[in-house]
């Protein structure tokens, strides 16, 4: 590539993909890669799943966009599936995870103002959390490196240490309008929430009439072996967000909420030009059926266990990983003391071995492959990873 016409906020890898199928990707030089990154937990059904290609082609011949002056069959169909398979009564469609979270946070503020007055506006979030890149969501996210250059930031946001119940109890009060958390902190290291912490947040939100928001942008849509990760610990939110795997590669985000909260989103109070786009909703609706099938969720659990077991063995053999954690097919391999801070380097070396993986922070190698990952692709990926680990140790 002679010229890169894009702004330099991404450090692009030295490989340009041309086409992809399932868990394999080919670059413009026709070299084949195993993809265990899943487009950062997006390509839940692998690349170019034939059923999704069919639905996309079919919808593309009918109507693409009609504006939110009208509703549509695909949007209603997908929303109905989300509602019937979750705690929620209503759905707002956006185009990304950040926009879904933006909607969730705005709804929590408006709901609190409508019912209790404008002083009830404080949002409690977790240190090291990640909720997106809009100004509001980087501010709510608990990683100052993403927000500090964009001050002044929105006010009324406090951060507490993740999984620290006492800190949460000290932070939540009558001025709290929302507590937001990821069921597994994805970007900062694949760190699961403790059930007791989620339950404490639920109890505090009940006590102080604040919204409990679960950000399931990365953990939702089958990623952990359940449709949504919070099902593992049985605590229900008032508001939840989804994106990434919801469209399996077509941009879509969703904010789900109970009827009580939905009522504050009165006509004109929030909106989106593209949210509920027919192409995205049609693909999302079919993807929902395929992901929510019991055999898919069982496969995620089985392959997740197998992959974690093999990664643990690889970690013991090489000494590069001190821990392998995560749920289903969202997996974090924590680098041993000796290799702390070098996850980025390992990701680059893996790419040289034709393996696509991710980092989560600087100390964790993250895998978020297709939920349909088969044994052959898993095993070939692990062979390549072992080669990358050897190169990493030798470097
Ligand atoms: C938990 C979580 N929330 C929100 C986002 C932001 O989603 P998007 O990049 O689609 O705006 C991400 C993206 O990585 C995420 O992992």
Image (cartoon, rainbow, N blue to C red):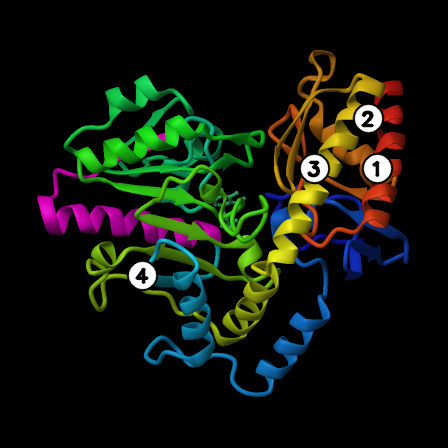
Find disc 4 in the rendering and name its residue: 89
Q: Which residues are magenta?
A: 97-126
Q: Residues within 10 Å of mark 1 (few under 14, many from 20)?
A: some
For residue 346, above or below residue 12: above
Residue 301 seen in render: yes
Cα separation, mark 3 vs mark 4, equals 33 Å
Residue sitting at the far bottom: 62
Cα separation, mark 1 vs mark 4, equals 42 Å
Q: Residues within 10 Å of mark 3 (few under 14, many from 20)?
A: some
- In the picture, measured across the screen, residue 236 lies left or right of residue 308, that is left
Find disc 2 in the rendering and name its residue: 314
Q: Residue at x 21, y 69 (%)?
A: 267
- In the picture, measured across the screen, residue 381 lies left or right of residue 50, that is right
Q: Nearer the viewer, mark 1 or mark 3?
A: 3
Residue 176 seen in render: no
Q: Nearer the viewer, mark 1 or mark 4?
A: 4
Give the image quarter of residue 152.
Answer: top left
Residue 362 drawn at (x, y percent):
63, 26
């Amino acid at each position: 590539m002679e010229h890169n016409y894009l702004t330099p906020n991404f450090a692009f890898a030295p490989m340009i993909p041309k086409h992809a199928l399932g868990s394999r990707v080919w670059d413009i030089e026709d070299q084949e890669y195993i993809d265990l990154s899943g487009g950062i937990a997006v390509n839940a059904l692998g690349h170019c799943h034939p059923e999704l290609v069919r639905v996309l082609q079919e919808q593309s011949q009918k109507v693409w966009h009609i504006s939110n002056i009208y509703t549509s069959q695909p949007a209603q169909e997908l929303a109905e599936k989300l509602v019937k398979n979750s705690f929620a009564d209503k759905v707002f469609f956006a185009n990304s995870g950040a926009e879904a979270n933006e909607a969730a946070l705005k709804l929590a503020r408006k709901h609190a103002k409508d019912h209790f007055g404008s002083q009830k506006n404080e949002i409690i979030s977790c240190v090291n959390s990640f909720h997106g890149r809009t100004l509001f969501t980087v501010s709510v996210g608990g990683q100052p490196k993403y927000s500090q250059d964009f001050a002044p930031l929105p006010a009324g946001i406090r951060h507490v240490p993740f999984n620290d119940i006492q800190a949460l109890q000290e932070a939540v009060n009558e001025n709290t309008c929302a507590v937001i958390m990821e069921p597994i902190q994805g970007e900062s290291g694949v760190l699961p929430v403790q059930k007791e912490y989620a339950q404490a947040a639920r109890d505090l939100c009940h006590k102080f009439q604040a919204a409990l928001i679960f950000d399931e942008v990365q953990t939702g849509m089958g990623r952990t072996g359940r449709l949504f990760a919070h099902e593992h610990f049985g605590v229900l939110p008032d508001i939840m967000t989804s994106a990434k795997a919801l469209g399996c590669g077509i941009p879509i985000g969703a904010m789900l909420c109970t009827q009580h909260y939905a009522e504050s989103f009165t006509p004109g109070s929030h909106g989106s030009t593209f949210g509920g786009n027919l192409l995205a909703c049609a693909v999302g609706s079919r993807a929902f059926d395929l992901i929510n099938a019991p055999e898919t969720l069982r496969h995620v659990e089985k392959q997740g266990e197998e992959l974690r077991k093999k990664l643990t063995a690889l970690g013991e053999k090489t000494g590069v990983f001190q821990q392998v954690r995560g749920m289903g097919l969202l997996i974090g391999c924590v680098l041993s003391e000796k290799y702390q801070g070098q996850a980025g380097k390992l990701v680059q070396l893996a790419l040289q071995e034709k393996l696509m993986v991710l980092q989560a922070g600087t100390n964790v190698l993250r895998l978020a492959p297709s939920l349909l990952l088969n044994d052959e692709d898993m095993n070939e990926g692990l062979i390549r990873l072992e080669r990358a680990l050897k190169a990493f140790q030798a470097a």
